[in-house]
Image (spheres, rainbow, N blue to C red):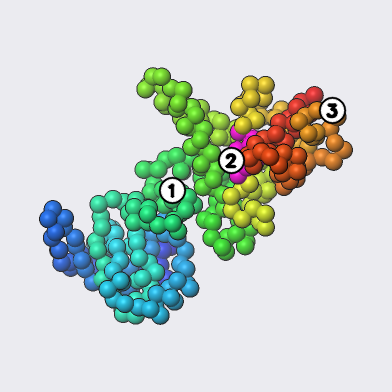
């Protein structure tokens, strides 16, 4: 990894990120009002941005095996640092790696930032999921302050290091559900914003959404422990989405509320539960996130998954607060 001013690039044996003394020579192709700049650049002068997905080696091998130059054009992002010109690949890293030649043909695409180009180029592809989009926005710097808020809060408050949801990170049991936590923040923000009557109050709605997001994390991590949401067999990378959404439903109950997280953690941590909150609590406490979800499936099979988990959590709260 190299830091070049405000840009961060990743290099390897093929893409060495060597800067050019002069701007890449290009040829313009004009079509009506559109102008496309084509250039030929050695692979050694290319690099990858941190917004890119990890290399899929089998995919590179497939492209190389069936190589055809007409389908090998890539997109390049150009920036200058010091007296050198540098080029990263917003789209086409696998085509570039598979190209049997020492140089590749690329289109210079500088109409947006490199992370924005990555999202735009891949927006119509099924393979680009919310994890890819989260990290692309995160690496877009100041243009995506909310993504940084979610990421940095986890790091600074909880000592959690969010990771991309790659197969390797899942196998290593890393914290791969940051994009889902961002989704929960978006839900909270949408709810708060929908109640705004005055445009000047939008800032207050954003602050309240942030407060609720932090409160939600206090409850979830405080009750079940932060390691409960790391990747493992029953939680590949979504962080038990039904538990987070179920807890949000419970906290929305006026009798529960988004306040006094210490009390809430104490109540939920007792693990006391009975179906529909009726009668005495079972002797078998629910002390793990897996046990909560399992109990919801057993006792409320007719409900949606989020509703099942919410029903269990609400009973736990009612018994815990007694």
Check the image and name the residue furthest to the front.
302
Q: Quadrant of residue 11?
A: bottom left
Up/down of 179 relative to 251, above or below: below
Q: Quadrant of the N terminus?
A: bottom left
Q: 84 or 117: nearer the eye? A: 117
Q: Earlier in the sequence, mark 1 or mark 3?
A: 1
In this figure, which residue is indicated by the disc labeled 1? 138
Q: Residue sitting at 75 percent across and 27 percent down?
A: 318
In this figure, which residue is indicated by the disc labeled 3? 279
Check the image and name the residue furthest to the top.
198
Q: From the viewer's perspective, is the residue at label 1 or at label 2 nearer?
A: 1
Residue 250 painted magenta: no
Mark 1 and mark 2 residues within 8 Å of each other at the beta carbon:
no
How far apart, in angstroms, are the residues tagged by discs 1 and 2?
Answer: 18 Å
Q: Which mark is residue 157?
A: 2
Q: Earlier in the sequence, mark 3 or mark 2?
A: 2
How far apart, in angstroms, are the residues tagged by discs 1 and 3?
Answer: 48 Å
Q: Quadrant of the C terminus?
A: top right
Give residue 297's position: percent from left, percent from top: 72, 44
Q: Which mark is residue 303?
A: none
Q: Quadrant of residue 267?
A: top right
Q: Residues within 10 Å of mark 3 (few under 14, many from 20)?
A: few
Residue 294 seen from this side: yes
Q: 274 or 14: nearer the eye? A: 274
Up/down of 79 relative to 210, above or below: below
Q: From the viewer's perspective, is the residue at label 1 or at label 3 nearer?
A: 3
Up/down of 36 relative to 294, above or below: below
Give residue 208's position: percent from left, percent from top: 51, 27
Check the image and name the residue furthest to the right.
283
């Amino acid at each position: 990894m190299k830091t070049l001013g405000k840009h961060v690039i990743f290099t390897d044996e093929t893409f060495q990120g060597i800067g050019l003394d002069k701007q890449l020579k290009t040829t313009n192709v004009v079509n009506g009002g559109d102008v496309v700049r084509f250039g030929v650049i050695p692979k050694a002068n290319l690099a990858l941005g941190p917004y890119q997905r990890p290399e899929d080696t089998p995919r590179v091998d497939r492209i190389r095996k069936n190589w055809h130059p007409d389908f090998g054009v890539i997109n390049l992002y150009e920036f200058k640092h010091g007296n050198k010109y540098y080029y990263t690949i917003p789209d086409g890293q696998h085509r570039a790696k598979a190209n049997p030649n020492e140089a590749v043909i690329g289109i210079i695409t500088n109409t947006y930032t490199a992370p924005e180009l990555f999202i735009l180029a891949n927006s119509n592809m099924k393979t680009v999921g919310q994890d890819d989009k989260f990290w692309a926005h995160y690496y877009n710097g100041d243009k995506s302050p909310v993504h940084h808020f979610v990421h940095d809060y986890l790091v600074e408050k909880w000592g959690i290091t969010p990771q991309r949801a790659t197969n390797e990170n899942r196998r290593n049991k890393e914290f791969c559900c940051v994009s889902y936590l961002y989704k929960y923040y978006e839900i909270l923000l949408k709810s708060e914003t929908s109640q705004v009557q005055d445009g000047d109050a939008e800032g207050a709605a954003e602050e309240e959404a942030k407060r609720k997001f932090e409160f939600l994390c206090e409850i979830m991590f405080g009750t079940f422990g932060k390691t409960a949401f790391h990747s493992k067999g029953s939680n590949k990378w979504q962080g038990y989405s039904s538990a987070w959404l179920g807890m949000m439903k419970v906290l929305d109950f006026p009798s529960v509320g988004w306040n006094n997280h210490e009390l809430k953690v104490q109540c939920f941590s007792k693990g006391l539960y009975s179906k529909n909150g009726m009668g005495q609590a079972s002797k078998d406490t629910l002390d793990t996130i897996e046990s909560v979800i399992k109990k919801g499936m057993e006792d409320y099979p007719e409900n949606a998954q989020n509703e099942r988990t919410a029903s269990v959590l609400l009973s736990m709260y009612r018994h815990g607060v007694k």
